[in-house]
Image (tube, helix red, strand yellow):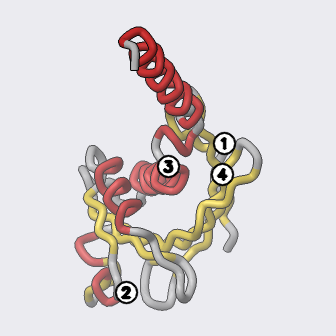
Amino acid sequence: MLPHLARRRGILCLLSAMLLVGACTSDSAEQQEGPTSGAYVAVVQWFVENSATPLDRPIVFLEARGEGLGIGLETQAAVVAGADDFAEVRFIDDRLEAFDDEGVRDDGIFIALGPVIEDGVRFNVECDQIFTEDQSTAWLFTLRFREGAWQLAGVPAELG
């Protein structure tokens, strides 16, 4: 093959690869942080900031809300890292891990997180704040990804 043809073919391959990479990247919420982990970090931060017993970097116990649901390991790792400045996040497999004789262990916060549901440009998360094995409050958070950060779209609604 002639050298100038090989060089052109190489340049075309490089340009094609660049176009493909450019087409696959985006500034969307999903590409920036992942809608699930970013939304969960924002929910955790709201609970920490609105806790009845404010602590510096409290323990926050998290579990998936709903029988048979789970939160993937990559999402768990991203939530732990994303909340590290304001909370010590612990994902649990068994509710007993979060309780002691007086309620939530270590004066922590216990949240059961539902799935992140995309609704156009907004994301909804239903969750339960659990106080004891028999007492909890359900919440609905509406969030959006704006200017590179997750933000609450209004005050979370207490569902009961």
Residue wearing tag 1: 153
Determine the residue positioned at 26% across, 86% down.
Answer: 100
Q: Earlier in the sequence, mark 2 or mark 1?
A: 2
Kindly tell me whether residue 27 is visible in this rendering.
Answer: no
Tag 4–tag 1 contact (CB < 8 Å)? no
Tag 2–tag 1 contact (CB < 8 Å)? no
Instruction: Check disc 4 and give the amino acid type.
Output: Phe
On the image, which quarter does residue 156 sit in?
bottom right
Front residue of this view, candidates 153 and 78? 78
Give the structural element (helix, strand or loop) at label 3: loop
Q: Earlier in the sequence, mark 3 or mark 1?
A: 3
Q: Earlier in the sequence, mark 3 or mark 4?
A: 3
Give the structural element (helix, strand or loop) at label 4: strand
Instruction: Check disc 3 and give the amino acid type.
Output: Gly
Instruction: Check disc 2 and give the amino acid type.
Output: Arg
Q: Earlier in the sequence, mark 4 or mark 1?
A: 4
| Residue 136 x, y percent position in the rendering | 53, 79
- The residue sitting at the top extreme is 4
Structural distance between the alpha carbons of marks 4 and 1: 9 Å
Residue wearing tag 4: 123
Residue wearing tag 2: 95
